[in-house]
Image (cartoon, grey):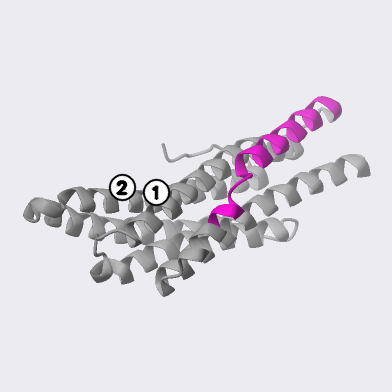
Amino acid sequence: MLPRYENKLNDIRTQISALVVAIIRANEETLNAFENNRNDLYESAKKHLKNIQTDANTIDNEVIKTLALYGPEAQELRLLVAFLKMTNEIDRVGENMKKYTTRLQDLCSSECDITIMAPSIIQLQKTTLNALQYIHEYLENMNTSDAEELFRKVSVEESKNDDLFSIIEKDLLNLIVNSHELSTDYVRVLATLRKLERTGDRTVNIAALLLYAQQGGELNYHV
C-alpha cells in the first residue's frame, strides 16, 4: 500500500490509543479517589471521559473514509474492520467507567458503609486497569507486538475480575437478604461494581479484535 495509506492507518491507531489513555487516566484517578477519599479526583476523572463518544465517532468516520478511498484487502482490511468495531467497545468501556465513577462518588458521600469490602473493590478495579494498560502498550507498539500474548494477558485479568466479582456479589446478596434496612444501598453497590465486571468483558473483546486483525480467523465476543 501507499505510504499515505500507511500514515492514515497509523493516525487512526494513534487516535484509538489516545482514547484508551483517557479511560486509563480516569480509572487511575477514580482508584486514587477511592483509596484516599479524594472527592476532587472523582471530578477530575470524569473530565477525561467527557469526549469519549464524540472522539470515537470521529475515528469511525476516518475508518469509513479510509475504506472508501483505498479499498484495502486482506490484513489491511481486517485491521480497519477491527478498528471500526473497537471504537464501539472503547466507547462502552468509557461509558461504564463514567457511570462507575459517578456512582462510586455518590456511594462514598452517602451513609452507605463499604469499608469492609474496600480491598476487594480496589482489586476488582485494578484488573480492569491492568487490562487497559496492556491494550495501550500493544497499540503503541503494534508492529512488533504479539496479539496472542495480549489476548492471553487480558483474559487472565478478566478471569480475575470474574472471580472477584463473584465473591463480592455473593457477599452483597447475603447482606441484601440479612440487612433489610440497608438492602437498597447494597443493591446500589452491586450495580456499581457490575460496571467493572462488564468492562472486563469489553477488554477481552478489544484484545480479540486485535488478535483478529493480526491473525485472522473468527471473532469470539462476550455478549
> Residue at the location (51% across, 47% down)?
93
Q: Is residue 174 magenta?
A: no
Spatial CA span between label 1 and label 2: 7 Å
Q: Is residue 213 above or below residue 18?
A: above
Q: Position of residue 89 (x, y in %)?
A: 54, 41
> Residue at the location (80% across, 29% down)?
65
Q: Position of residue 108 (x, y in %)?
A: 34, 62
- Residue lying farthest bottom? 36
Q: Would you say the residues marked 1 and 2 are in contact, meaning their CB atoms lie under 8 Å apart? A: yes
Q: Position of residue 55 (x, y in %)?
A: 68, 41
Magenta: main secondary structure: helix
User: Can you tell which quarter of the image residue 34 is in?
Assistant: bottom left
> Residue at the location (56% across, 47% down)?
206
Q: Is residue 67 magenta?
A: yes
Region of the chain picked out in magenta, as a range: 45-69
Near-viewer residue (78 or 10)? 10
Amino acid under label 1? Lys
Q: Quadrant of the C terminus?
A: top left
> Residue under circle 1?
195
Amino acid under label 2? Ala
Q: Which mark is residue 191?
A: 2
